[in-house]
C-alpha cells in the first residue's frame, strides 16, 4: 500500500478515538490490515517521502500535532520507515521487524502481493474514504 493511503487510513482511525496512544495503536493496526491487501507500491520512494513530509509538516503548522488524527496518521506511516531504509539499502529484508514486512514473519502475516499501477485506484478510493471519515469526525466534534 502506498504510504499516503496508510497515512489517510491511520488518520481516520485516530479520529475515531479520544487519546493519542489509542490513535497511534489504531494507526499501527490499520497498517497491518492494509498491507494484507494486494496493492500497488510507488517505485519512486523519494516522491512519496516528500509528500508525507509535507503533509506532516502541514499538520504540525496547523497545530494538529497533539490530536488523535496526527497520531493515528503517524502510527499508520511509521512501519514504512523500515521499508524506506530497506529500499535505500540501509537494512536487510530479514532485519525488518514489522509483521508483514519481515521475511521470516511473513509466513504468518503475509504482505499482499504487488500489483501494477492500474490497481492504484483502490488505494485512491480507500484514502478518499478515510479523508471523509476524518472530516466527518472533526465536524462532529466541532458541532458538539
Image: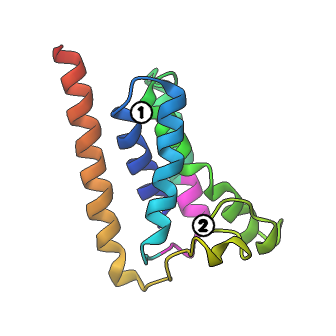
Residue 89 seen in render: yes
Label 1 packing within 10 angstroms: few (<14), some (14-19), many (20+)? many
Q: Is 43 included in the stretch rendered in magenta?
A: yes
Report whether 37 appears left or right of 65: left
What is the span of residues highlighted in magenta in the rendered image? 41-50
Which secondary structure is most common in the magenta stretch?
helix
Question: On the image, numbered disc 1 is attached to which residue?
Answer: 69
Label 2 packing within 10 angstroms: few (<14), some (14-19), many (20+)? some
Question: At x 57% / y 53%, what residue is drawn?
Answer: 50
Question: At x 50% / y 67%, what residue is drawn?
Answer: 35
Q: Residue furthest top?
A: 144
98 to 89, vertically: above or below: above
98 to 117, vertically: above or below: above
144 to 133, vertically: above or below: above
Front residue of 46/83: it is 83
40 to 54, vertically: above or below: below
C-alpha gap between disc 1 and disc 2: 24 Å
CB within 8 Å, label 1 to label 2: no
Question: On the image, numbered disc 2 is attached to which residue?
Answer: 45
Relative image position of residue 126 (x, y in whole percent): 30, 60
Amino acid at each position: 500500500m502506498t504510504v499516503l493511503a496508510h497515512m489517510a487510513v491511520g488518520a481516520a482511525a485516530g479520529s475515531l478515538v479520544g487519546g493519542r496512544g489509542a490513535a497511534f495503536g489504531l494507526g499501527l493496526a490499520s497498517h497491518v490490515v492494509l498491507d494484507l491487501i494486494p496493492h500497488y507500491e510507488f517505485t519512486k520512494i523519494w516522491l512519496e517521502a516528500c509528500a508525507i513530509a509535507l503533509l506532516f509538516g502541514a499538520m504540525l503548522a496547523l497545530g494538529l500535532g497533539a490530536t488523535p488524527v496526527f497520531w493515528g496518521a503517524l502510527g499508520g506511516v511509521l512501519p514504512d520507515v523500515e521499508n524506506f531504509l530497506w529500499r535505500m539499502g540501509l537494512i536487510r529484508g530479514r532485519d525488518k521487524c514489522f509483521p508483514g514486512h519481515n521475511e521470516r514473519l511473513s509466513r504468518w502475516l503475509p504482505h499482499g502481493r504487488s500489483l501494477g499501477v492500474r490497481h492504484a485506484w483502490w488505494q485512491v478510493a480507500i484514502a478518499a474514504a478515510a479523508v471523509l471519515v476524518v472530516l466527518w469526525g472533526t465536524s462532529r466534534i466541532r458541532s458538539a
